[in-house]
Amino acid sequence: MNNIKSIVAASLVVVMGLMSCDSGNMRRTPGHIYAPDMTYSRAYDAYTTNPNFADSMTSRLPVEGTIARGHQMPDHLKEGDTNAYKTFTTSAKFSEAELKEGGRLFNIYCGICHGQNLDGQGPLFASGKFASMPANFKDAKYLHMSVGQMYAAIKYGKNMMGSYASQIDIRQRWMIIAYIKKVQSTNGGDAYTFGEAASTPAAPAADTAHGKPVAAVTGK
Ligand code: HEC
């Protein structure tokens, strides 16, 4: 009996010995790592579980009641409050550069349906793949639409149009509306009111905060 045990034990040792030698050319250890704490982060990765918090989530929500730098106070426009839509507005004014940015954002987010000419003939609608006619901002029906109602459309969507609240922040929404209103003002719409007072030369402070050189864009 003892014999069998020792034979088994001995052969195990031999097999394990062979296994440890027989790795061919394959290296199973990575060797030395320079600055291992850079290779293997000691911080918790986002989206991993975390024992330090009761809900085990590493990604934390912002502290309640705080506003991230560069962001604005939330608006209090409620969905479906069509009376508030009529009067809701902003005191924001936009430089030429910001108006141009509004146009850029419009072409990215809205042009596909509303068309880069704002005539409701964007490529998605023109292709026939999108059944519902997007607003034609040059049509009498929309020329005098209140800015609050436009804002509500961006924030909450309208029928077949989805909400853009998660992609476009508050200031950007107003920039886009300013752009629409500017184009409308030269197509029979109301006078444009989002512009800065003529004596203020394109607010360099505000524009450098957006990381855009003013001179390059205001010339146009
Ligand atoms: C996927 C297509 C689509 C995109 C993208 C889209 N819209 Fe629309 N939009 C529509 C349609 C369709 C309507 C007409 C809704 C209705 O009255 O039934 C509409 C209506 C509107 C209206 C009129 C709202 C009202 O109360 O009648 C405004 C303003 C508007 N869109 C602005 C925007 C802006 C600004 C963007 C970009 C941020 C945008 N839309 C992106 C499809 C789109």
Image: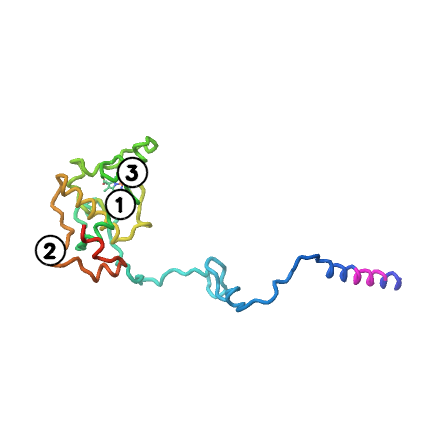
Nearer-N-terminus badge (3/1): 1
Compute the Cα span from label 2 to label 3: 34 Å
Is residue 56 rendered to the left or right of residue 184? Answer: right
The yes-or-no answer for disc 3 within 8 Å of ligand 1 is yes
Residue 132 pos. (x, y %) = 29, 33
What residue span does the magenta drawing correspond to?
A: 7-14
Mark 3 element type: helix
Q: Is 206 situated above or below 220?
A: below
Is the C-beta of the residue carrying label 1 under 8 Å from the nearest atom of ligand 1?
Answer: yes
CA–CA distance between discs 2 and 1? 25 Å
Residue 126 quadrant: top left
Is residue 84 or residue 152 the one in the foreground? 152
Query: Residue 173: horizontal and vertical position, in percent?
Result: 25, 50
Could you tell me the amino acid type at mark 3? Cys
Spatial CA span between label 3 and label 1? 10 Å
In terms of sequence position, does the residue under pointer 2 or pointer 3 come before the other? 3
Q: Give the mark nearest the N terminus, 2 or 1.
A: 1
**Which mark, residue 106?**
1
138 versus 210 height, above or below: above
Give the label on residue 134, or none: none
Can you identify the residue that label 2 sits on? 198
Image spot of residue 71 (x, y percent): 28, 59
Closest to the observer, 32 or 1: 32
Q: Is mark 2 on a helix, strand or loop?
A: loop
